[in-house]
Amino acid sequence: GERAAQVRRACVQAVIEGKPSVERLAELMGLSQRTLNRRLALNGTTARTELLRVRMRIAQQLLAGTTVPLAEIADLLGYADASAFTRALVCASKSFLRSPMTGGGATTTSSSNWSSCAFFFRSSAISRAN
């Protein structure tokens, strides 16, 4: 629906800005983080999960359709280095990349399955800030 499209657009904007965080996503949506996550929970997802899904979709497109080096893709998507990005990509590839918000077929993967993948972003964001 329209809300799903708004969330995806805001996620893409946050990534492009170099600020792929739940805080920035909530700002872009004009909501508090708590309200954003409450609304996303109605669709079986979280802001962190949607950010990760969008980042992984962008990564897949860049890896498949360009010759941009892995390290540059990692940097673009907010990872500390290519190694952290590669670990997150492998983790995400084991999960179902379709969001419950995108419609279409049934999904069997809940946002909780993404929690271990999100770890790689959190750890890389900390590394990047230092």
Image (spheres, rainbow, N blue to C red):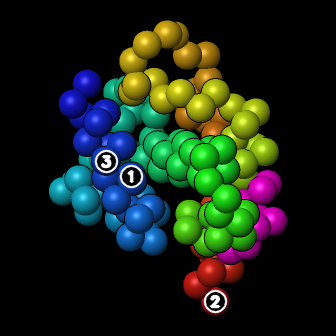
Position of residue 47 in the picture relative to residue 74 (left or right): left
Which residue shows up at 36% across the image and 43% down it? 8
Q: Quadrant of residue 83?
A: bottom right
Query: Residue tagged by mark 3?
Result: 9
Q: Is residue 92 above or below residue 87?
A: above
Q: Residue furthest bottom?
A: 130
SS under mark 2:
loop
Which three-letter amino acid code belongs to the residue tagged 2? Asn
Q: Nearer the viewer, residue 96 or 110?
A: 96
Query: Residue tagged by mark 1?
Result: 11
SS under mark 3:
helix
Q: Position of residue 2 (x, y in %)?
A: 21, 30
Q: Earlier in the sequence, mark 2 or mark 3?
A: 3
Which stretch is magenta? 79-87
Which residue shows up at 29% across the image and 36% down it? 5
Asked if the residue under mark 1 is in contact with the one under mark 3, i.e. CB atoms within 8 Å, the reply is yes
